Every structure is written in structure tokens, then in C-alpha cells.
Amino acid sequence: MTQEQLADTRRRAIQWLHRSRNDDGSLGYLPRRAGRAEPTLLAVAAGLPPPLDWLDTLSTAWEWRLLPTVLAHVAEAGGLRDRALARLQVDQGLVSGLDPGFDAGIPAWGWVPGTAPWVEPTCHALL
């Protein structure tokens, strides 16, 4: 595939994502279905304008871990990005109720505050 073909394919994919968005700017797993964090965040990372109001309603920790990276180059997202970074700092290493043999001193993130750290949510936070 040539660079020109690749650019055209990307342009058409972005147009399809635009058409598939919900009125609030979110994307579901299927076009025009309930907005979900993963497809919305990935679409924003691919270049769609971020639905800042919708993103601000995300509730789980893992969703907020991706916001600083996804919004890194979006000037108008500064407040949301700063809140997400602050939340990352608070959530790091919050573990409880673990197996006695587990090393709770690992400076990492879990999927949910108060649970064991995992590689993937830690990667999201570090990005």
C-alpha cells in the first residue's frame, strides 16, 4: 500500500468514525449504540475531537488512566487532563485485602483502586 493509499484509508476510517458517533460525541461498540470508554478513547487517540463533557462523566479508574495520553495534544482539555493526572497520583499503589505473600509495595496501578496492581492499567497510567 502506498503512502497515498494509506492516507486515504485513514481519512475514510476517520469519516466513518465521525458518522458512527452518538449525539454526545461518544462511540459504542456498534454504531449509534451506548457510548463506551474504550471505543471513544481509541477514536480520540486516532484523531477525532474529544467529547470532553462525556469523557468527564467516566467513572472507573482504568478509564481515567487513559485520559492524559489521549488528551495530551488537546489544548481545550487541560482541566480534564489535569484532574486525570491528579487521580493517577492518588490511585497509585492503593491495595488492600491481598494474599499475605503479595508484595503490596509495588508502585503500580490496579484496574480499580484498592485492588492489586496489574501490568495493563499500569501501562495506561504510564503512557
Image (cartoon, rainbow, N blue to C red):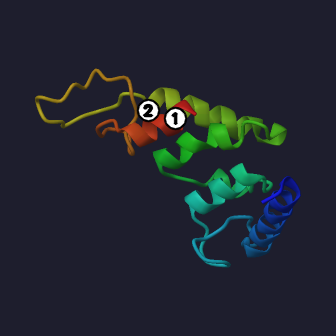
In percent of the image, x 33 and y 35: which residue is there?
117
Q: Look at the image and tell me whether residue 16 can be seen.
A: yes
- Quarter of the figure with the N terminus: bottom right
- Quarter of the figure with the C terminus: top right
How far apart are the alpha carbons under marks 1 and 2? 10 Å
Query: Is 48 drawn above or below residue 28 in the view shown?
Result: above
Q: Which quadrant would residue 22 be assigned to in this image?
A: bottom right
**Residue type for callout 2:** Asp
Give the percent coordinates (x, y) of residue 101.
12, 28
Query: Is 26 drawn above or below residue 79 in the view shown?
Result: below
**Residue type for callout 1:** Ala
Farthest right residue? Answer: 4
Q: Is residue 45 left or right of residue 48?
A: left
Local crowd at mark 1 within 10 Å, few (<14), some, or many (≥20)? many
In percent of the image, x 51 and y 52: which residue is there?
59
Query: Is 10 drawn above or below residue 75 in the view shown?
Result: below
Q: Nearer the viewer, residue 81 or 123?
A: 123
Q: Secondary structure at mark 1?
A: helix
Q: Which residue is mark 2?
A: 91
Q: Nearer the viewer, residue 87 or 116?
A: 116
Q: Are marks 1 and 2 in contact (CB under 8 Å)?
A: yes
Farthest front residue? Answer: 1
Give the percent coordinates (x, y) of residue 76.
83, 41
In percent of the image, x 43 and y 42: which residue is there?
120
Q: What number is the disc on residue 125?
A: 1
Q: Look at the image and tell me whether residue 52 can be seen.
A: no
In percent of the image, x 36 and y 28: which residue is there?
93
